[in-house]
Image: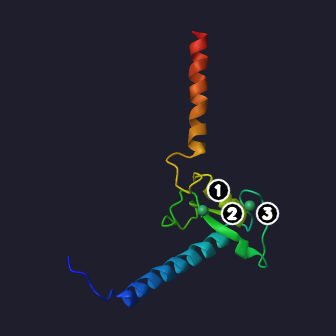
Amino acid sequence: MPTRKTPDTAKLDRIVAEARRNRERREQDYREQALKIYPWVCTRCAREFDRSNLQQLTVHHKDHNHDNNPPDGSNWELLCIYCHDNEHSRHLDSAGRKLESSPEAQAVHQPFANLRSLLKNKE
Ligand SMILES: [Zn+2]
Ligand SMILES: [Zn+2]
């Protein structure tokens, strides 16, 4: 494999900058749309926002896929920066890794386990 003595960092920088610009433009885009669709209120703590503090109101993607931006807003949720932080840290372990199954998913399975043991007692 040939090794280049002078890596083309300028080109790389340009690509990185371009990608960042695209992402920022896209984020700006769906945020504006979400703010048009939804009232300026945090979905979790019901804190209300106006133009003076609107930068603290962020758009959360329900499925955590930032590329999934349906125009009807069904994948968006307006959260204040604190609730947004919370929302994401629930899905991370202490090392910041993404968990395979969230505590929510495990909680959903719990009632069925109880139900099964209840049925067993009845028999
Ligand atoms: Zn909040
Ligand atoms: Zn989010």
Tell me if 77 is positioned left or right of 99 in this view.
right
Quadrant for the C terminus in the image: top right
> On the image, numbered disc 2 is attached to which residue?
79
Closer to the camera in the image, 16 or 51: 16
**Marker disc for residue 47:** 3
- The residue depicted at 44 percent of the width and 81 percent of the height is 16
CA distance for labels 2 and 1: 9 Å
Label 2 CB, ligand 1: below 8 Å?
A: yes
> On the image, numbered disc 1 is attached to which residue?
87
Closer to the camera in the image, 96 or 17: 96
Circles 2 and 1, Cβ within 8 Å, touching? The answer is yes
**Neighbour class for label 3 at 10 Å: few (<14), some, many (≥20)?**
few
Tell me if 49 is positioned left or right of 24 in this view.
right
Label 1 CB, ligand 2: below 8 Å?
A: yes
Circles 2 and 3, Cβ within 8 Å, touching? The answer is no
Position in image of residue 51 (x %, y %) = 77, 78
| Mark whose residue sits in front, 2 or 1 | 1
Q: Secondary structure beneath disc 2?
A: strand
Tell me if 45 is positioned left or right of 29 in this view.
right
Q: How is the image coloured?
A: rainbow
Earlier-in-chain disc, 2 versus 1: 2
**Marker disc for residue 10:** none
Tell me if 114 is positioned left or right of 9 in this view.
right
Q: Secondary structure beneath disc 1?
A: helix
CA distance for labels 3 and 1: 16 Å
Amino acid at pointer 3: Arg
CA distance for labels 2 and 3: 9 Å
Amino acid at pointer 2: Leu
Earlier-in-chain disc, 3 versus 1: 3
Amino acid at pointer 1: Glu
Closer to the camera in the image, 43 or 103: 103
